[in-house]
Image (cartoon, rainbow, N blue to C red):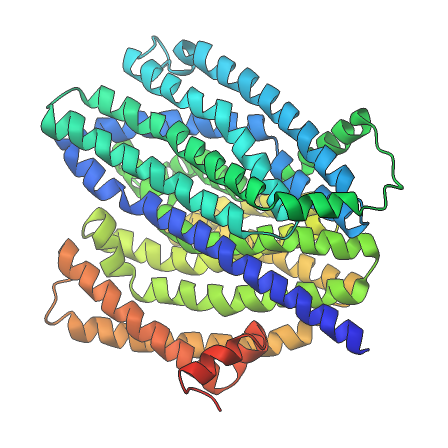
């Protein structure tokens, strides 16, 4: 019994540590990725919009090729390495990594070559190719050579539940990318007064620069951990014999569900992309440009901001998969139940206050990034709550993947998309521009409820305990929301929320007050201790918050 309790605490400790690192890497990268646009856009001067358009169109194609060239394999590597490590077959996990590197290198070369040589066709605007778009697109193809290698190296570390190298490489990659983008944009546009096309080309080339720095850091981590990894391989059971062909088949078999499930949020967005314009046009009299502006408010502007907090869920999801896979391989259902509870508790503890907080400061934070816009702020307000649904979906799909329930996860995803499609027009009819967000929430809610019920029945997940903690978390989040709104309204009498600098000060001060309130409230009621475990006690004693 005591041994089981120790295992449970060790699992929670590993999960919390991994989640902390992945959250750091993911959030820091998202914030950097959002903040760089402010000076970059300004330095482009009168060419800001067209420079942004060239980048956006290129990145849409680039994202597709990255999906193809990585093919869900990094997540599979993490899961399968964790599986073999749980069986004390570390040698097979290393062999899987080495074979995966070869496969990723081949996929990277093929995908990069196709994107490079097909750029004239991909850059077509319907009648002819845009030479500027071709050059910008080709500058991104170099990153596709490298990123598959970077991704699989991260997956290997994650298979050992060692999230720190992945998180640090993610931050270093993004930092190097942003530095290169801003440095080249400043030199070309501000010092040399050169071509904005050349500046955009260099900004897109930054993806490859960042990937090289990320790989370099991961190689260093591999060498620094080499003795420890070699020792694990040397003491493996070596009872399983898996051929190279079987390893490749295993990778491919597991990769397809990962591609489908990991693209879930994107698929929901695609429904909006292809249906919002014709549906809203049939209901209101507005120009095509006006409708596109409305779509941009929730499809691009608000989405970019809420994905900062949705990345919290992604970080936890990445941490949960290898741990659940290992427990599933051992047939340890008690550990599975505990791990699901740990994942859900931590997600709710972080995600709900983050979403409520963003909703509370929707007006000033929207102003900081995009300028003052009442409609845009309102859409961000609703989008902030939608982030909870998106985050829950992300975490629950990852849990099902970790438990090898890929088929069920895909069925739930398809059901959610069908519901989203059915509800899209009625919701737009009722709520106009807010309709797509409402339809997304309803579709995701069904997926979430079905997933939770399945985990409760199949794996004895203690839904009642998590529900009780949810009540406390929500109550404190509502309290935080009200306090943040009061602080924002009070300071708003002295700091103009319609100007970027004063709006930024408003955001910082309001968020600071909200974090302090939520932290003290959850610590004083022992809610934080229950969710975060005994390790938080050292912090409490140090700051004299708890006896």
Q: Using the rendered view, name the quadrant where residue 263 is placed.
A: top right
Please provide percent x and percent y for residue 78. 66, 43
Report the label total: 0
Judge whether 354 appears above or below 288 on screen.
below
**Left/right of residue 547 with respect to residue 481 in the rendered view:** right
Please provide percent x and percent y for residue 541. 46, 84
The residue that appears at 55% across and 29% down in the rendered structure is 148
Judge whether 507 appears above or below 306 on screen.
below
**Left/right of residue 32 with respect to residue 315 in the rendered view:** left
Q: Nearer the viewer, residue 310 or 220?
A: 220
The residue that appears at 43% across and 21% down in the rendered structure is 142
Please provide percent x and percent y for residue 451. 68, 57
Please provide percent x and percent y for residue 25. 45, 50
Residue 390 appears anywhere in the view: no
Q: Kindly give the residue lying farthest to the bottom in the view shown.
A: 547
Q: Kindly give the residue lying farthest to the front in the view shown.
A: 227
Residue 141 appears anywhere in the view: yes
**Left/right of residue 506 with respect to residue 477 in the rendered view:** left
Q: Nearer the viewer, residue 86 or 137?
A: 86
Q: Nearer the viewer, residue 222 or 394?
A: 222
The residue that appears at 45% across and 44% down in the rendered structure is 170
The residue that appears at 45% across and 50% down in the rendered structure is 26
**Left/right of residue 231 with respect to residue 111 in the rendered view:** right
Which corner quadrant holds the N terminus? Answer: bottom right
């Amino acid at each position: 019994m005591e041994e089981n309790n120790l295992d449970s605490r060790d699992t929670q400790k590993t999960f919390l540590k991994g989640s902390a690192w992945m959250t750091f890497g993911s959030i820091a990268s998202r914030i950097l990725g959002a903040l760089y646009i402010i000076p970059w856009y300004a330095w482009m001067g009168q060419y800001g919009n067209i420079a942004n358009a060239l980048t956006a169109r290129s990145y849409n194609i680039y994202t597709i090729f990255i999906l193809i060239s990585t093919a869900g394999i990094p997540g599979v590597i993490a899961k399968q390495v964790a599986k073999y490590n749980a069986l004390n077959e570390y040698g097979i996990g290393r062999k899987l990594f080495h074979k995966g590197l070869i496969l990723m290198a081949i996929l990277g070369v093929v995908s990069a070559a196709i994107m490079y040589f097909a750029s004239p066709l991909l850059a077509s605007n319907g009648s002819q190719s845009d030479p500027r778009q071709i050059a910008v697109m080709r500058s991104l193809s170099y990153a596709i050579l490298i990123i598959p290698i970077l991704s699989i190296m991260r997956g290997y570390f994650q298979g050992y539940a060692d999230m720190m190298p992945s998180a640090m490489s993610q931050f270093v990659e993004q930092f190097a990318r942003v530095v290169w983008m801003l440095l080249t944009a400043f030199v070309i546009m501000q010092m040399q007064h050169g071509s904005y096309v050349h500046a955009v080309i260099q900004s897109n080339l930054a993806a490859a620069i960042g990937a090289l720095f990320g790989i370099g850091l991961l190689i260093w981590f591999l060498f620094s951990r080499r003795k420890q990894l070699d020792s694990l391989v040397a003491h493996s059971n070596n009872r399983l014999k898996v051929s190279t062909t079987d390893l490749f088949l295993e990778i491919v078999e597991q990769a397809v569900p990962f591609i489908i499930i990991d693209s879930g949020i994107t698929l929901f967005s695609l429904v909006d992309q292809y249906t919002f314009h014709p549906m809203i046009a049939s209901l209101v009299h507005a120009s095509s440009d006006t409708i596109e502006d409305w779509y941009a408010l929730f499809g691009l502007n608000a989405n970019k901001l809420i994905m900062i907090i949705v990345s919290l869920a992604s970080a936890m999801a990445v941490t949960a998969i290898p741990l659940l896979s290992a427990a599933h391989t051992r047939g340890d259902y008690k550990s599975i139940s505990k791990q699901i509870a740990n994942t859900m508790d931590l997600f709710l503890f972080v995600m709900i206050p983050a979403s409520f907080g963003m909703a509370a400061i929707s007006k000033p934070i929207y102003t900081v990034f995009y300028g003052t816009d009442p409609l845009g702020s309102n859409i961000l307000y609703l989008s902030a709550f939608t982030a909870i649904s998106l985050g829950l979906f992300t975490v629950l799909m990852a849990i099902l993947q970790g438990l090898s329930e890929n088929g069920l996860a895909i069925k739930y995803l398809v059901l959610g998309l069908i519901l989203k499609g059915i509800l899209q027009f009625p919701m737009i009819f009722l709520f106009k521009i807010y309709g797509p967000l409402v339809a997304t929430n309803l579709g995701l809610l069904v997926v979430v409820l079905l997933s939770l019920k399945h985990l409760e029945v199949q794996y004895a997940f203690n839904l009642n305990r998590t529900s009780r903690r949810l009540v406390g978390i929500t109550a404190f989040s509502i309290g935080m929301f009200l306090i943040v709104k009061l602080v924002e309204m009070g300071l708003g009498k002295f700091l103009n929320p319609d100007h970027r600098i004063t709006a930024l000060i408003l955001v910082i001060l309001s968020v600071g007050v909200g974090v302090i309130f939520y932290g003290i409230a959850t610590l004083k009621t022992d809610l934080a201790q229950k969710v975060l475990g005994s390790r938080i006690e050292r912090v409490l004693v140090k700051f004299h918050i708890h006896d």
